Image: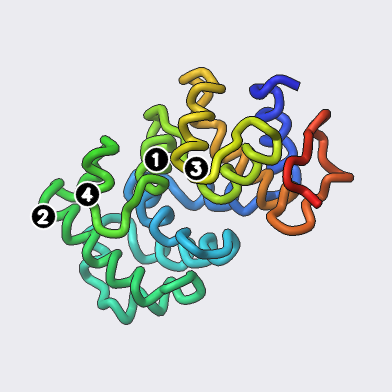
Amino acid sequence: MDPIEVIEVMEREAIKRKAPVYHLKAEIKTPFQHLVAALLSSRTRDEATVRAAQNLFAKVKKPEDLLKLSEEEIAELIKGVGFYRVKAKRLKELAKKLVEDYSSEVPLSFEELVKLPGIGRKSANVVLAYSDIPAIPVDTHVHRIANRLGWARTTKPEETEEVLKRLFPLEFWEKVNRAMVGFGQTVCKPQKPLCDECPIKGCPRVGVK
């Protein structure tokens, strides 16, 4: 199977198995919400990120809404994600920065995004990719699967990102992350991957014991 076909198979399988990433997609409508969800997702189980995002977005639609809440109120809404108190503080800082420096708009350039509190390379790429700007966010799922398939032989996410950018045409980049994340959540799991149920033909299973 060629890489594009593999991604399309992953996408179909992840949707069929109701991967959390597709639930999160239904909750997120704006670049601001993508930014917040990306910050919440760091060191957090996917299901917990979805729950926290649902709780927060029920009250928060724009940066000004975050500024109206105390850190304690934000922490209570996102309780369940890793380092939720630290993230509550970062969310307040993020909202303040957006309001004061960007007129409440999310900047859609990588260089500006990584200047924002709590936003690193992966989170910046998530915002870009889901704003129809070519980018391939690489999280633990994407990094793991790229190496298991033998597409990459890398140790760092940024190295995997460069490999995937060379492997896929620009117009296909946006689909890569969501399909690989969803497949990693449901089939190609970190521990005990469901290889017997995997629809990808010829996977070399690099590193799978």
Image-based side of 8 in relation to 27, left or right: right
Identify residue type, mark 1. Asn
Going from the N terminus, do you reach mark 4 or mark 2 first? 2
Q: Are marks 1 and 3 in contact (CB under 8 Å)?
A: yes
* Residue occupied by mark 3: 138
Identify the residue at image location x=22%, y=70%: 68
Residue indicated by mark 4: 115
SS state under label 2: helix
Q: Is residue 164 left or right of residue 85?
A: right
* Label ID, residue 100: 2
Using the image, determine if residue 185 lies above or below residue 145. Answer: below
Which amino acid does the dot numbered 4 rest on? Lys
Residue depicted at 22% across the width and 64% down the height: 93
Q: Which dot, 1 or 3, sits closer to the camera?
A: 3
Q: Which residue is mark 1?
A: 125
Residue in front for this viewpoint, 42 or 21: 42
Q: Are marks 4 and 2 in contact (CB under 8 Å)?
A: no
Horizontally, residue 38 falls left or right of residue 117, namely: right
Q: CA distance from mark 2 to mark 3?
A: 30 Å
Q: Residues within 10 Å of mark 1 (few under 14, many from 20)?
A: many
Q: Earlier in the sequence, mark 3 or mark 4?
A: 4
Residue 84, quarter of picture = bottom left
| Callout 2 crowding tier (Cα within 10 Å): few <14, some 14–19, many ≥20 | few
- Marks 1 and 3, the one that precedes in the sequence: 1
- What amino acid type is highlighted by mark number 2? Glu
